[in-house]
Amino acid sequence: MLIDFRPTAAKILKLAYPVILGQLGIVLMGVADTIMVGDLGKESLAAVNQANNLFFMLSGLTFGVLFAISTLVSVKVGEKRLSEGYTIYQSGIWVSLLLFIIQFIIMSLLISQFHLLQQTPEVNAIAPGYLKIVIWSILPLLLFLNCRQYADGLGHTKVSMVLTFLGLGFNILFNWLFIYGNWGFQAMGVEGAAWATLLSRWIMTIMGMTYVRYSKLMKSYIMEGRMSFWETRKYTHEIWKIGIPIALQTFAEWACFALSGIMVGWFGNDPLAAHAVALNAASVTYMIVTGIATAGSIFTGNAFGEKNYFKIKHLGQITLILILAFEIINAALFIILNKPIAHLYRVEESVLPYILPLFFLAAIFQVADGIQAGAMALLRGVKDVRWASVISMVSYWAISLPLSYLLGVILEDGVYGVWLGLTIGLFVAAIFGVIRFYKNVNKWEVAK
């Protein structure tokens, strides 16, 4: 393993860096929104944060189903059956349309009852208006994710990177136009940020679907991949079969963070704004490890298709080592540069005393968060999605949320107690995710 470590790590990082940059592009959209909306005041910042919490809590279910596509495509690559990848992509379009209808209906009901979340009056007044616009971006977001998962599964990770950064550019431009009313546009404030998000997501989707259908790189797969209705139906079933357990896993994690944000909202606008900034900053560094995890998942999916179990173990070990190294560096940066990072968000002075201690907690929890993300991605690569969902449900719903409520609300440690509960749950997910991956590999090696 030591002899092969460097070239294998280089292969993983080569595949990972476009994913990392693409992920960063998505997160930087949130950073841009946070910074530009932050100029409107802490109430607007808190409202947009809670609106996005609710949006992405439900997106954990719908996105999770589509995460199955890259796994299925990468396995086909390992099996040397590339022509079937495009049929999986086509099936993903139909799945995306159904997921849109489901998420749209649920989101509409939640928006109408937003006051039940018991947030501050300012948040209750602003957030529903933002969501009523952003809700229409669910469809383009799902269709773009389908394109991205298909391209990533084939190993063409640069595609989504380029499209995402183009979307980021449009998002910043539209924010500048619609939030502040530049170039003669009406200043719409928070609703302007919602329109910017909606339009930039549609542009990304149109570009993505056009590229998959008409680019020279993808055309050979399309020509080979024309299959019957029954073949498309078969892969639709496969997407649901693999995707539902992944959806439960992602929903457990994303909902945990969303509900913890709702708890923080009970403590007032200042802690909530601090929570939004600290979590947003942590998500930027987190994208590095999710890129590595995605690359590891693709390579292990290829090896799983080849039935090369030694290679799966080898790739998994290197993926986890790379993630741990990057997360230790990220943690050090959060501790050393906490003040400069916090000042980038231009929040009000009353928010800063809450932000700085949260950066220290973020430095600790993102190490565990990175390892659990890597372990769950490796489990997806080998199609062990049921145990990944069980581990996530237990870690987040049976440990993180009850602990966050106990420490933050009952014991009155506020936002810091909530974050401590999250951290403990992440460590549990990381430990059991790694154990499950190695248990699988050792079992296959014995059987072989």
Image: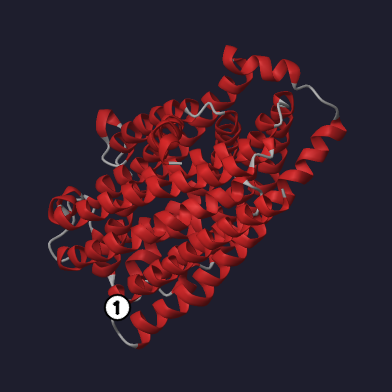
Pinpoint residue 259: horizontal percent, then vertical percent.
45, 68
Q: Is residue 120 visible?
A: no
Task: State the residue at coordinates (49%, 29%).
Answer: 157
Task: State the residue at coordinates (28%, 74%).
Answer: 416
Viewer-nearest residue: 331 or 189: 331
Name the residue that disc number 1 marks: 414
Viewer-nearest residue: 345 or 101: 345
Vertical comparison of 106 with 298: above or below: below
**Left or right placement of residue 95 versus residue 50 in this view:** right
Residue that extends furthest to the bottom in the rendered view of this protein: 411
**Left or right placement of residue 438 versus residue 129 in this view:** right
**Left or right placement of residue 36 versus residue 381 in this view:** left
Task: State the residue at coordinates (32%, 47%).
Answer: 326
Q: Hey, which quadrant is residue 407 in on the image?
A: bottom left
Q: Hey, which quadrant is residue 197 in on the image?
A: top left
Pinpoint residue 222: horizontal percent, then vertical percent.
70, 19
Task: State the residue at coordinates (32%, 35%).
Answer: 172
Viewer-nearest residue: 68 or 41: 68
Q: Is residue 240 visible?
A: yes
Pinpoint residue 144: horizontal percent, then vertical percent.
55, 35
Vertical comparison of 364 with 341: above or below: below
**Left or right placement of residue 421 versus residue 297 in this view:** left
Amino acid carrying label 1: it is Gly
